[in-house]
Amino acid sequence: MSIQAGFGFGEDVRWSSVNRRVREGPQAPAMPRPCAEGMQMRWITRHDVKVDRVACPWLIKRFVDPEAEFIFVAEDELLVTAARLNAIPFDAPRLAAVKLNHRGQCCTFEALIEDYKLTDPALRRMALIVRGADIRGQEHVSAESPGLRAIAHGFALSGIGDEERLKQEFPIYDALYQYVRSQSR
């Protein structure tokens, strides 16, 4: 399916072509899967996704497990639901038991890159943008961060559900990835 978007400058962006270029780009090395071969990984996080909780599913789908399933729950239900569903919890900074989380000044997106040993320089640059957009006080790490934060908050204000936010925001992350890849060359 091709989604067309004009940005008021006479251009026409076809998101399907952005997605195709992302898929054709350098691939991350195969990573060990935490579940039996052939089964999709389940990931769980807090509901009402914004920056990091959109960026992480994008990263997982594009570079770790394209068949991953995402579940969104209230924070106080996260650990119990994760255990019951055998899901991997992520991005819950108030829950010390969650391994894939903010680490020091770094956001969960950076923790995923580290833990899954993703070495693409564009992902490392993108991680700074995500960190600056996600973590208050880190806006200075990237000029693009305030814009990404504004986009995420705009989607949050739209009233759409978490799954729909992922669906609508993934093309933005695809385009951002292409942008940082072009800047790295």
Image (cartoon, rainbow, N blue to C red):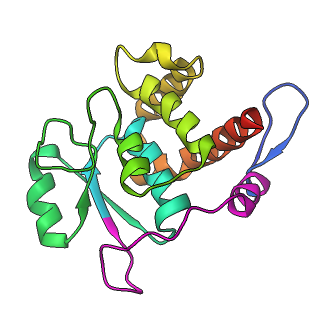
Q: Give the quarter of the image for residue 109.
A: top left
147 or 36, nearer to the observer: 36
Task: Write the residue at 48% across / 50% down.
Answer: 166
Q: Position of residue 112 (x, y in %)?
A: 38, 50
Task: Write the residue at 20% across / 36% down.
Answer: 93
Asked whether residue 1 is in view, the answer is no
Asked whether residue 54 is in view, the answer is yes
Instruction: Work out which residue is located at the far right of the displayed protein and give it.
Output: 10
116 up-or-down from 13: above or below: below
Q: Quadrant of the N terminus?
A: bottom right
148 or 25, nearer to the observer: 25
Assign the magenta stretch its main secondary structure.
Answer: loop
- Count numbered badges in the picture: 0
Task: Write the residue at 71% across / 41% down.
Answer: 181
Q: Which residues are magenta?
A: 17-42
Q: Quadrant of the C terminus?
A: top right
Q: Position of residue 11 (x, y in %)?
A: 88, 34
Q: Position of residue 86 (x, y in %)?
A: 20, 72
86 up-or-down from 25: above or below: below
Q: Is residue 146 magenta?
A: no
Task: Write the residue at 28% across / 44% down.
Answer: 91
22 or 158, nearer to the observer: 22
Q: Position of residue 80 (x, y in %)?
A: 8, 60
176 up-or-down from 163: above or below: above
Q: Is residue 33 magenta?
A: yes
